[in-house]
Amino acid sequence: MKMLISSALLLSSLFIATPTLACDDHKLEISDSYVREMPPASKNTAAYMQLKNTTDKPLKLLEVQSDIAKKIELHNIVNVDGVLKMQPQPYIEIAANNSLILKPGSYHVMMMGVKRQLKQGEEVKMTLKFEGGMTRELTAPVQPIMPKSAKAGS
Ligand SMILES: [Cu+2]
């Protein structure tokens, strides 16, 4: 019985040490993340991913940080008088109990002034910062743009 009590105490003290982390992990699921492989001479690229908000409140992605780029912005592609243009966004909102896919032609994490040419097989570490102080670390693989044959089906 004494053993049981001491291990229970140990367990509860472990939970006290990391209360917010354990909680935040259930709020958001990140999947299918990748960073676009860069063509020669290009200094810019973009990161894409699926963000699933499992809470009953909207979540706002405010900022992405990474050592790999000099500047990172949140972008969307919008139609301005029939011309598709990239537009910086103050945040990207994921609706309550919903998923948002960051993908080519839509929302993306714009990485500008990338310090080396990223090739398939590499990985990029980044930190996502959300409203309310939640942060998530992410390691995304570098992948080439989808070949035309795969794109035709979607
Ligand atoms: Cu962009």
Image: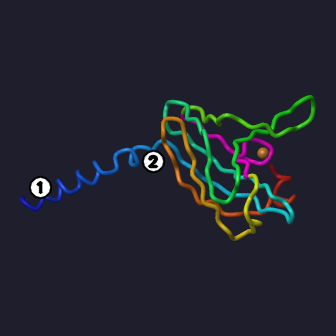
**Which residue is situated farthest in the front direction here?**
70
- Of 58 and 38, nearer the camera is 38
Q: Residue at x 78, y 48 (%)?
A: 104
Q: Main secondary structure of the magenta part?
A: strand
Residue 154: image location, x then y, percent: 80, 49
For ligand 1, the image quadrant comes to top right
In this image, 17 relative to 30: left or right?
left
- Of 102 and 39, nearer the camera is 39
Q: Residue at x 71, y 35 (%)?
A: 89
Quadrant the N terminus occupies? bottom left
Is label 2 in contact with label 1 (beta carbons under 8 Å)? Answer: no
User: Residue 90 shows which numbered tag?
Assistant: none
Residue 83: image location, x then y, percent: 92, 35
Q: CA distance from mark 2 to mark 1?
A: 28 Å
Figure check: 85 above or below 123: above
Q: Residue at x 40, y 48 (%)?
A: 21
The residue that mark 2 highlights is 25
Figure check: 58 above or below 120: above
Q: At numbered mark 1, what does the secondary structure look like: helix, strand or loop?
A: helix
First along the sequence among labels 2 and 1: 1
- Write down the quadrant of residue 107 in the picture: top right
User: Residue 5 shows which numbered tag?
Assistant: 1
Give the magenta-colored segment's residue range: 97-111
Name the residue type under label 2.
Answer: Asp
Q: At numbered mark 2, what does the secondary structure look like: helix, strand or loop?
A: loop
